[in-house]
Amino acid sequence: MTDYRFPVSVEEALDILDAHAASSTPSGSGSARVIAGGTDLILDMRRGKRNPACLVDLTRIPGLDQIRVIGGVVEVGAAVTFAAIQEHPYLRQHVPALTAAARSVGALGIQTAATWVGNIVQAMPAADGAVVALALEAEARVVDRDGAVWWSVEELFLGPGRSVVDSTRQIVTHVRFPLPGHSWGTSWQRVGRRASLVLPIINCAVRIVLDGEGIEQAVIALGPVAPRPFRARQAESVLTGQRPTDEALAEAARIAQGESDPRSSVKRASREYRLAILPALVRAALHEAVRRARGSER
């Protein structure tokens, strides 16, 4: 039977992980695992895919349930749910791509339990939270016995469901992302078989930073079009320094299509269909992000 522990500090959580690490097998059986929302892990346990001896729940550690705006940075704790992100006034006004992505993560019952940090650590190529984290150029604070290190979220992804983070000995305590100092906007676009479906056909997050009438920076994140959440860097490069005309945005969307390599999926859609709709989705996201960068809404 799996033990369930509620540490009240990160140090205590690491102690619990260490205590179980000595008795774990190479497959991970017998080990302890970190949990906050646990929506994916609990399903894996019910299906027999994982068998941890202990679950280390982070939700009672002070501060990990907080969203803080500190100077030019937003910091989100590991226990912050997607529902809490949606309800946060600052994020609703200034980072609508994040709150929109939070609304995309399953049904309401999932959103009230699942956390942004957990969604990122799962490292699934279609994960809404991971894709929007790429667009925001987010970083994750990874803590273990050697100390704490901020990793680029993009660097965490090794492949489908494979993360640099080892949840049997490491803890991601926070995710943070910078707020550009001048005109910028974000957008979230998603195509699925129905609005509350957990599995998207295509999702896209964009961030645009303007400098006068030109594009200073464009970030285009996509999923699931590769083994990992993916940035269309060639399309981003084409936009840098350009005026955000209809033609320029359409060309970037076509380039993003060429960079993408989705596979056919019975649960989602065929490769051909996904490639066919991708340019329109990216183009819509770019246009919305530009409009927001030019106005007061982000």
Image (cartoon, helix red, strand yellow):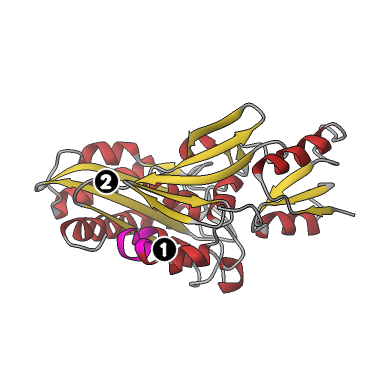
The x and y percentages for residue 165 are 62, 37
Q: Does residue 14 belong to the magenta stretch?
A: no
The span picked out in magenta is 90-97
Classify residue 80 as left or right of residue 294: right
Q: Name the residue located 57 percent from the left edge and 37 percent from the top edge.
A: 142
- Count residues near mark 2 (Cα–Cα under 10 Å), then give few for <14, some for 14-19, many for 20+: some
Q: Does residue 96 belong to the magenta stretch?
A: yes
The x and y percentages for residue 243 are 12, 46
Q: Secondary structure at mark 1?
A: helix
Question: Height in image: 252 above or below 152?
Answer: below
Q: Name the residue located 30 percent from the left edge and 58 percent from the top edge.
A: 285
- Count residues near mark 1 (Cα–Cα under 10 Å), then give few for <14, some for 14-19, many for 20+: many
Q: Is residue 274 visible?
A: no
Of the image marks 1 and 2, the number of the one nearer the N terminus: 1
Classify residue 83 as left or right of residue 274: right
Q: Mark 1 — residue?
A: 99
- Overall secondary structure of the magenta section: helix
| Pick the front one: 130 or 180 | 180
Q: Name the residue located 55 percent from the left edge and 61 percent from the top edge.
A: 81
Quarter of the C terminus within the rendering: bottom left
| Pick the front one: 230 or 147 | 147
The x and y percentages for residue 164 are 60, 34
Question: Height in image: 146 above or below 283?
Answer: above
Q: Secondary structure at mark 2?
A: loop
Q: Mark 2 — residue?
A: 180
Classify residue 239 as left or right of residue 192: left
Residue type of the residue flagged with mark 1: Thr
